[in-house]
Amino acid sequence: MINAKLAAKSHPQHQSIVKLNSQVAFGGKELVIIGGPCTVENRQQMETVAAHLSTTSVQALRGGAYKPRTSPYAFQGMGETGLEILAAVSKKYHLPVVTEVMAISQIHAIASHADMLQVGSRNMQNFDLLKELGQAGKPILLKRGLAATIEEFVMAAEYIMSHGNLDVVLCERGIRSFDNYTRNVLDLAAVAALKQITHLPVIVDPSHAVGRRELVAPMAKAAVACGADGLIIECHPEPDKSVSDAAQALSLQEMLELVNSLKPIATAVGRSISELAVA
Ligand code: PEP
Ligand code: MN
């Protein structure tokens, strides 16, 4: 029995709606698809991505300005310059932005440039950060820890909620296992379980789950079929040149084809996918 007070579902129909902005919300009939590169690399890259995605059913833009890299020698992100690029393209193409926060010291700057703050897997149990995000004034995308149990994941959401922020969206992004053919193992049973345990919207990140672009589309489809409320998917104008996570990045054309292929699956499970994000 999970000891969550605020995140727990109180009756079978209990479902929270978490607004990303005045037009886009998680947890309703319509699925929310977030797309963009792993890392913000430069203005031109983000312009190209946003210009393309804004003509598709993708409703929000992703891109890291502060990157949690395994090696301290790897590119760590553009920092505030990256946030400024995100804010500028967001405004120009009418796409709300989701970006990662790694430290309490970054919350203010990120909250003033982005629509939603992402807590990455490596920080899912950074309890001081979670508590502070209770006061961030922006919705939080909480990713499951690399080896977190479902209970630990729900209780991490409870930290944010109990400190004042009820706008939390959970993201299943795969967990560590013994097989390194895929980067992680996408735990779709967790998606179904979380939908039963909590009233929070649950989305899936097939990109970090599989780590290989050829497996992203099938897992995205499975995620929609099993009840996910949305997807966050990495794509890049020149995938092989991505500064980080090149192997899992889709091209912009592949992203468009994937989103279109999800529509019949969404319909089959009583959901929908937005028509164009911009009129
Ligand atoms: C990311 O979304 O770029 C990321 C680093 O994800 P995760 O925290 O799931 O590894
Ligand atoms: Mn990535």
Image (cartoon, rainbow, N blue to C red):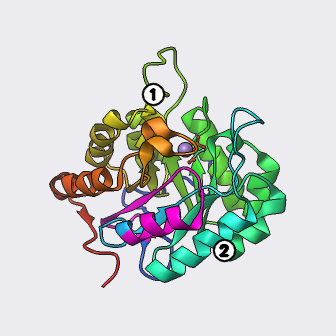
The answer to which quarter of the image holds residue 125 is: top right
Q: Secondary structure at mark 1?
A: loop
- 182 to 262, vertically: above or below: above
> Is 230 positioned to the left or the right of 164 in the image?
left
> Residue 260 versus residue 248: which sits nearer the camera?
248
The span shown in magenta is 25-51
Q: Is residue 259 left or right of residue 46?
A: left
Which amino acid lies under the numbered mark 2 shown in the image of this protein?
Answer: His
Q: Name the residue located 74 percent from the left edge and 54 percent from the top edge.
A: 130
- Asked if residue 226 lies in the magenta stretch, the reply is no
- x and y, in percent, of residue 226 in the image: 30, 44
Q: At 37% from the left edge and 66% from the top edge, which residue is drawn?
A: 53
Q: Do the CB atoms of the residues marked 2 and 1 lie less than 8 Å apart? A: no
Which of marks 1 and 2 precedes in the sequence?
A: 2
Q: Quadrant of the C terminus?
A: bottom left
Front position in the image: 98 or 156? 98
The 10 Å Cα crowd at callout 2, few under 14, some 14 to 19, many 20 or more, is many
Expressed as whole percent of the image width and height from the top left, the position of residue 205 reads 45, 45
Image quarter where ligand 2 lies? top right
Q: Would you name the residue on which mark 2 appears?
A: 113
Q: Position of residue 253 (x, y in %)?
A: 28, 55
Q: Which mark is residue 185?
A: 1
Q: Is residue 138 above or below residue 231?
A: below
**Residue type pointed to by label 1:** Val
Report whether 135 appears left or right of 138.
right
Determine whether the residue tagged by mark 2 lies in a helix, strand or loop. Answer: helix
User: Hey, which quadrant is residue 51 in on the image?
Assistant: bottom left
Q: Which quadrant is home to the N terminus?
A: top right
* Residue 16 locus on image (x, y percent): 47, 65
Residue drawn at x 66%, y 74% as measured from the top left: 113
